[in-house]
Structure formats: structure tokens, C-alpha cells
Image (tube, helix red, strand yellow):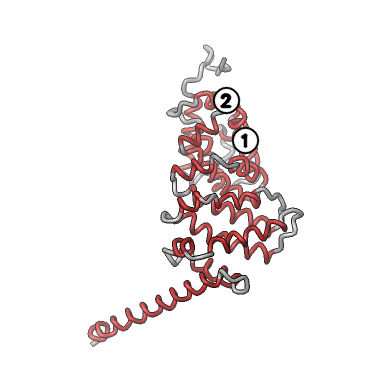
Amino acid sequence: MSIELNVATSPVKQAVTTALAQVDREKIYQWINELSSPETRENALLELSKKRESVPDLAPMLWHSCGTIAALLQEIVNIYPSINPPTLTAHQSNRVCNALALLQCVASHPETRSAFLAAHIPLFLYPFLHTVSKTRPFEYLRLTSLGVIGALVKTDEQEVINFLLTTEIIPLCLRIMESGSELSKTVATFILQKILLDDTGLAYICQTYERFSHVAMILGKMVLQLSKEPSARLLKHVVRCYLRLSDNSSPHTRAREALRQCLPDQLKDTTFAQVLKDDTTTKRWLAQLVKNLQEGQVTDPRGIPLPTQ
């Protein structure tokens, strides 16, 4: 009897599910239309930002609907006067971060990513990354802005790296890596890691001593800070950056030689043994890093490394 009942009711369930999905979709269309009006925009931003994970084609819907991207950019530009002097309120921060969340959705979707880059939309976020105020509204604003760039680099697309290298993203990330909150530091270091893992990005950073030394200096400061306030997640990204700079398969031998001179002692001794005791991946990276820097090193008869000429 129960089997017959299930069979009988399953089409009904499907119909109900379809109807609910249609109602939900109608609401999405309504909210997208409401973005165009300043009076209804704030609520629409909030509702759409909640739905961005559950609506797979939200990004194309946002990109191709009339006036929507202009409305999102207007939300961003409206905040600029609150940056300097730093008067950003929690309410302003929450509202613009909902707009940024929708832009992140557009940035990470394969159908809209190229157009998003071609329109140079990430540049609208850079003033937020320039801010230094430690208040929560500003920290939230920086973190959400970094999330948009993080969503771009996560795709491992060459066009993303090529675009970012024409901008000031590396010095911006380095500054946040030095003085941001732990979460912001983690996302900024992840972005740098993704740039380094790309051959073009690695070549760019190793092209001049100034670029390389700036990166190495900030990474060194982070290791020192991590030895006092450990974070396994952040340390993982820092070690991966160092490992890439030491890569024996890359042609950047000068970078590897310089790294031998400036690699923090904390990465060579047991400082992080406790933090990494359950992280086999980072332990393996760290061992490989030390091995890479030892290979090809000239030593005197007593086994002591000699300085490179």
C-alpha cells in the first residue's frame, strides 16, 4: 500500500517542487529588476546576495540584465567619499559588501569572467584595498574585496593573471599581508600564491631584485609573526609561496640563491613542528623547500655553505 501511495504522490511532489522553484525564480527576476531603483536596491542586494550560492546561473542573469552592473558599480562608487577621511559605518559596509558579493559571483562564473575582466571592474575595488583603518566596517570591506580577487585567481585562468599583473594587486596584497587581520592576510597570501604558481607571475616577481626582495621581506616578517601567533592556515600559504620561489625547475636561479640568504631560521628548525603536526601537505612542502635550497649549494671541505659569488 505504501509503495502505491509513494508512486501516486511522487508526480505531485515533483509538481510542487517545480512550482516552488518557479516562484523562487520569479523572485530572483524581481530582485534583479529592483536593483535599478535606488528605493528598492538595498533589500534586493541583501536578498540576491543570500541566493548567490543556490542559483547557478545568477551571474549571467546579473551581467546581461539592463542596468544591473551599473547599479552595483554605483553602490561601490557611493562609498568612496567615506574612505578618506575614514567614516564608513557598519550599515554602509554591509550594503556595499552585498554588492561586492554579487560581483564575486560574476567574477567566478566561466560565462561572465572574461567580460568582467575586459570591463576592468576589479579596479573599482582597489581603493578599498588601499584603506588602512582597523575598524570592523573597513576590515569587512577589505576582506570582501579580496574575496572578489580571490574568486578570480581560484579559476587558474591565464587571462586572470595577465590582467592582474597590469595592476597594482601585488603591492596591495603585500601591504595587507603585513598589517591586515588574520583572515585578510590569508586571502591576500592566497592571491599572491596563485600569481606565483603561474609561470608568468613568477617571472614578473623575479624580474627585478626590488620586486623579489619586497615579496621575500614581507614573507619573512609573516614567518616571524606566525612564530609568535601561529595560524596553520596562513602558514600553509606562506610556505607554498616560499616553495614556489625556490622551485628548481624554474629558470630563476638568482631568486633561489637570494632565498638561501634570507630564508627565516624558523622554517629551518622545529619552530612550527607543533602547528604542523597534523598537516602532512605543508610539512612535505617545507621539507621540499629546505631540500631545494640545499641542492647545488657550494660547501667548503668542512661542509659549511660558502656564500655565492
Q: Position of residue 47 (x, y in %)?
A: 54, 71
- Which residue lies most toward the bottom here? 1
Q: Nearer the viewer, mark 1 or mark 2?
A: 2
Residue at 54% of width from left, 61% of height from top?
69
Q: Amino acid at mark 2?
A: Ala
In the image: residue 60, left or right of residue 237: left
Name the residue tied to disc 1. 220
- Which residue lies most toward the front here? 66
Q: Earlier in the sequence, mark 1 or mark 2?
A: 1
- Residue 121's place in the image compared with 189, above or below, is below
Name the residue tied to disc 2. 258
Q: Position of residue 120 (x, y in %)?
A: 54, 49
Q: Position of residue 92 (x, y in %)?
A: 67, 64
- Which residue lies most toward the right here? 85
Q: Position of residue 40 (x, y in %)?
A: 59, 74
Say which of 174 and 96 sits in front.
96
